[in-house]
Image: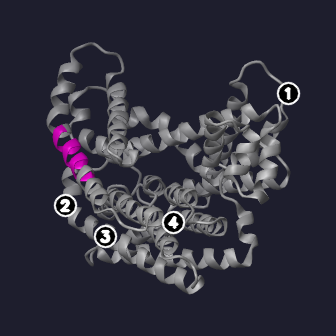
Amino acid sequence: MLALVLLAGSASHSDPVVPVLLALVFLTLGAVVGGRLMTLAKQPAVLGELLVGVIAGNLGYWLGSAGLTVLREGDNLRKISDLALTSSSTVAQAVYQVLPPQEAARIAASLSSPRSLDYLAVYSFVDFLSRIAILVLLFLVGLETSFVAMKRVGKTALVVAVIGILVPLGLGLVTMKLLHPRSDFASDLFIGGILTATSVGITARVLRDLGQENRDESRVILGAAVVDDVLSLIVLAVVSGLAVTGRVNPLEMGRIILVAALFLAGSLGIGIWLTPKLVRRLSGAGIQNLKLLFGLGFAFLLAWLANAAGLATIIGAFAAGMILNDFFDKELQGESLHHLLSPVESLIVPLFFVWMGIQVKLEALGSRDILISGLALTVVAIVGKLASGFGCPAPMNRWAVGFGMMPRGEVGLIFAGIGRGIGVVDDGLFSAIVILVMITTLLAPICLRLTLGQGALPAERRA
């Protein structure tokens, strides 16, 4: 993985795909090595993938690798390139408008070099690929989640999600007021809103690594995470409106709730009724690889529809898997869709977790105030989600559910980025959120492993 540092110094080339190929080789190599080491240590592979990314990104930064220094900025690179394309600013000037001064100079110098287009190309490709990877992962999780079984734990999942929103929000407000008594209420509320986020992609991967995705606790976690996404969007709409206008817009809240309810009910209801009829008609058309093409196409379509409805794309992909779960493999002969997608999962899903690890900035721990804020908010974030686990009935493993809801991952970073964009989250608080995201993301796989244990892998995955 460390060889990715060479990205900044490779020889000139004529084919623009060359730097992307090199990045993919070392991202894949890093994912394989990290995952294998964790597997040997009887830990989930995702933990090794995250740690490899953290080590590579930060070591590359400290060794002066221009390529890794740029790639660590993640979504900031999209903002920089968008600003440069839509205004009269150069790329270097756009850097100073997006990043704080202490970081901007080094990034601007790297993006002013002849290699800048290569860095942006690598970022764009890997970022898009990692987003598709999460859709594939949640689609696979949905395929293994029976709609009937999900209905059985639906009430529990709703209770878990509501607790997982209210408790972190309240604790976040109190913590911010204690740490920063003079801060604006809008800023405190926004930080509390960030703590409500849950990154289901990490938990879903750990459950699959452990072979525990068919437990009731797993279904509660996934169901609660879907509800959590909807509720977090509502919270985000409320706190953003308060931060920008000073007041809450009840109409916007109502619109989000209505759209979310209509999408989830409509996609599941219509999909379960319509999809079997469509599949039966297509099965006689002689289309090669119909099962794979239809499955992925259906997942991407529902992900697109979810985004059009103002929801997270992962909700659509997860819903698509649940719709196809009970009948798809029975209607179409041949290998199961899960087995057909297994090589795709093995290739691109680990890249997402390495990529997320690369964007973790350990230097954020350097400031005492930021470190204290980050650690305090991290404790609150962990306690808040652990409390959600006690929304489960006693026979369930409440600790496992709480730990499954704990990682913030890319969702927390996205919320923090929005807050920084509208001016309620400063650079110090953003760094504290990075610490929170990093710790909860790295702790969740370990804690889930300890609370759930290593289950027996299904026969298809052992093959």
Q: Earlier in the sequence, mark 2 or mark 1?
A: 1
| Magenta region, residue range | 260-270
- The answer for how far apart the CA atoms under marks 1 and 4 are is 41 Å
Which residue was labeled with disc 2? 152
Q: Which quadrant does the N terminus fall into?
A: top right
Q: Amino acid at mark 1?
A: Ala
- In the rendered view, would you say 90 is above or below 200? above
Q: Locate the C terminus by quadrant.
A: top left
Q: Secondary structure at mark 2?
A: helix
Give the amino acid type for the residue marked by disc 3 in the picture: Val
Q: Residue 164: percent from the left, percent from the top?
A: 37, 71
Mark 1 and mark 3 residues within 8 Å of each other at the beta carbon: no
- The vertical placement of 251 against 107, above or below, is below
Q: Is residue 338 left or right of residue 148?
A: right
Q: Which of marks 4 and 2 precedes in the sequence? A: 2
For the residue marked with disc 2, what is the amino acid? Arg
How far apart are the alpha carbons under marks 2 and 4?
25 Å
Disc number at residue 162? 3
Whether tag 1 and tag 4 are in contact, CB under 8 A, the answer is no
- The Cα atoms of the two marked residues, 3 and 4, are separated by 20 Å
Image position, residue 279 (x, y; %): 21, 26
Q: Nearer the viewer, mark 1 or mark 4?
A: 1
Comparing marks 1 and 3, which lies closer to the viewer?
Answer: 3
| Camera-side residue of 222 and 305 | 305
Single out the mark in the foreground, 3 or 4. Answer: 3
Q: For the point 41% across and 59% down, which residue is it?
A: 455
- Which of disc 2 and disc 3 is earlier in sequence? 2
Q: Quadrant of residue 124?
A: top right
To which residue does mark 4 refer? 444
Of mark 3 and mark 4, the one earlier in the sequence is 3
Q: Can you tell which mark lies on residue 11?
A: 1
Say which label, 1 or 3, has the lower sequence index. Answer: 1
